[in-house]
Amino acid sequence: MAVSGHIEPYAITAAESWSDARAGLGHIFKAIDLSSRQIANANNGQNPAGILQGIALNNENAQVAIAGVSKYVAAAAISVGAQLRITTSGYMTTAGSGFRVVGRNLRASVASGATGQGVFYNLVHPGQFEVASGAQHGDLYPDLYSFTAQADLSAAGSVGKAVDAASGDFPVVNQGTVVLVTGTVSGGTSYGRVTGVMSVLAGNVIVAARGLAVAASGWFIHATSGDMVVARALEASAAGNSGSMFRVALNMAGTTAAWSVAYL
């Protein structure tokens, strides 16, 4: 029997009733759309919030898994080790060329309509799947990365900005590699986070569910076509307020180029 394991959880408010707990037939373990907060609008994984982990009524909070080991519901037969993507109505199916991979099937093969177990990299910031190489963007668990500061990263207002760990300084546009967690003066060891759910600093007014890019000096802004998407906003920034902290699903290690309005 498939079981869920370690997950990166996130609470989301339902915009419809998710009261059917029947495995494979009901709402549980299906993908949720981040913008509409509904299962039916999962829309092939372009804007997922995660995999539903429990039941909830309309306007109630429910837990979703953004990353980790979780059950899922198969739309068609899925083989052991297959790359997974989201299809209509929150189901998972085998990824093909051009689709956005969210994870990999674990253990046994899964029949159509059955519940399987997968390891999911980052559902809110999925990667592009390349058939030729099997390339997969994303990481399983959030982590800290240490680097040597080459500028003063200890000033107030530095934590929550993107930093280029290679240069040890705040980046130019689209070049951040970590989000600063602990900053030091030049020459000290600083720490940044690469993936996971965390708070970052807004460079302008941020709308929930938008893809995000790094601006000059490490601020987070809405991604536009051609930008490297490094995170997705889980909430809006404070109304009319740049410079405020807001929560994101981060994946600095698995950036993808913004290529369409739907993905942003």
Image: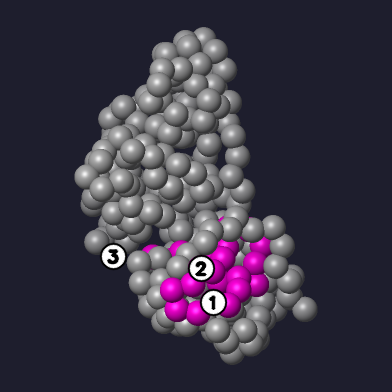
| Tag shown at residue 248 | none
Kind of residue sitting beneath label 2: Asn
Q: Do tag 1 and tag 2 residues touch (Cβ < 8 Å)?
A: yes
The residue at the point 38 percent across, 40 percent down is 245
Query: How far is mark 3 from mark 2, CA to CA?
Result: 26 Å
Q: Is residue 181 visible?
A: yes
Q: Position of residue 169 (x, y in %)?
A: 40, 20
Kind of residue at badge 3: Ala
Q: Residues within 10 Å of mark 1 (few under 14, many from 20)?
A: many
Q: Are marks 3 and 2 in contact (CB under 8 Å)?
A: no
Location of residue 196 with respect to 54 vertically, above or below: above
Q: Is residue 60 magenta?
A: yes
Query: Which is nearer the N-term, disc 3 or disc 2?
Result: 2
Residue 39 rendering spot, x and y as whole percentages: 45, 78
Q: Which residue is mark 1?
A: 56
- Residue found at the far right of this picture: 1
* Disc 1 from disc 2: Cα separation: 7 Å
Q: Secondary structure at mark 3?
A: loop
At label 1, the amino acid type is: Ala
Horizontal side of 107 relative to 14 (left or right) equals right
**Quadrant housing residue 177:** top left
Q: Which residues are magenta?
A: 47-71
